Amino acid sequence: MTKHVLNVGLIGLGRSGRDIHGQLLVQLPELYKIAAAADPLPERRERAEEEYGCRTYHDWQSMVDQEQLDLIVNASPSHQHVPITMALLEQGHHVLCEKPLARTVEEVDQLTQAAARSGSRLAVFQQARYQPAFRKLQEVIASGVLGEIVQIDLTISGFSRRWDWQTQQSHHGGSLMNTGPHPLDQALQLFGDDVEPDVWCRMERTLTLGDAEDDVKLILSGPGKPLIDIEISSCAAYSRPAYRVKGTQGGLQGDGSRLTWKHYNPEEAPEQQLVEAPLAKSDGTPAYCSEQLNWVEGSWDAPPPPSDTPFHEMTERLYTNLHESLTTGAATEVTVAQVRRQLQIMETCRSQNPHLYTK
């Protein structure tokens, strides 16, 4: 594909289709043009015609039959991701599918095989690794100032009830599949791909009105790797920081808008030796181990977003990389194989919680 501006068809004009994809794509006119959109709700179609100046359709099949599209964004409800994406790939269309791409590894393999047969590109919309705060966290860890990383906590929690379709198992809902792809993608970036993690997961229904989980504790561990603690909860009246890193020379904590960290230089620390005898102060009274470390502190504040589009910078980076992939053949940075690995972990999580998921 050699053309520069790609014609896009949007499937679904809800919170993701309109509020994320649509609002970002109109800000990248040098790369993309929203040529058409499909949604069963007439008021959404009317709004799309006004906002994008595009043609609209009641159903996605009519749209792809009548339009010449370079990329189709599948922002349909989660349980429709696999059948719609499969049909589009088999028809030879390039597809960017919203998360969750699928429910099982088997479904991911089927989509991958369909793309290979037709020569189509399959991409997944998981942009969390481009979050500025996460990239800064990676930078601090890579610098080595925190020493050996012992544990990393990733938290997305609050206190709220939810009662929409994304709380239902039949619609592939629940916190693990709705929210989980974001912290799990970050976790696996930090964990690395040279070792497969051991997985422990506990899921519960707490405040949700649906039958899927809204409280998730997921722990990844492995030899030579930090323990990674992922928490996604709707019943956390007092929540942990979004990010917390523990290392042998210091630590980091913060959220998407601000990070702080501190560390010491072992070469400047007082020299100590193991003592087996009871410790005592100069006056002979019992003492506890105590020393003064010279802490070096740092902080980072997120730059103001360039627009009020949700997740603007993360979304723009993913779409820019996808455009390069479609026009030059460059590799996508978020790969289907990486998403497959996430879903393998999610399948393990469900198997460990048979009180919620029987299969």
Image: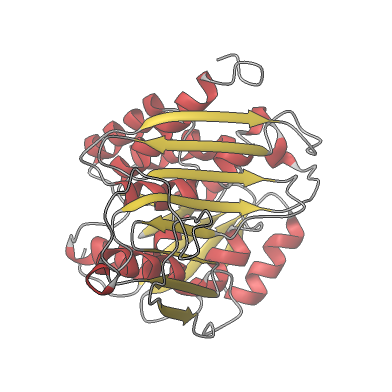
Give percent across and percent down for residue 152.
43, 51
Q: Quadrant of the C terminus?
A: top right
Residue 64 lies, in percent from the top left, at: 46, 50
Scheme by which the image is coloured: secondary structure
The residue lying furthest to the front in this view is: 283
Quadrant location, the N terminus:
bottom left
Q: Is residue 344 above or below residue 120?
A: above
Task: Please give the name of the residue rendered at 44% of the width and 71% of the height, measured from the top-left corner.
Answer: 261
Residue 231 image point, x, y percent: 58, 45
Point out residue 291 in the picture as x, y percentages from the top left corner: 41, 67
Note whether residue 28 is visible.
no
Q: Residue at x 31, y 35 (%)?
A: 222
**305 w.r.t. 206: above or below:** below
How many tags in the picture?
A: 0
From the viewer's side, name the closer residue of 149 and 108: 149
Whether residue 342 can be seen here: yes
Answer with left or right where residue 265 lies relative to residue 312.
Answer: left
Q: Reply above or below: 166 against 189.
A: above
Q: Residue at x 20, y 40 (%)?
A: 194
Q: Work out whether residue 345 or residue 47 is closer to the camera in this orientation and state it.
A: 345
In this orientation, which residue lies closer to the viewer: 340 or 58?
A: 340
Q: Is residue 38 left or right of residue 140?
A: right
| Location of residue 105 by image quarter | top left
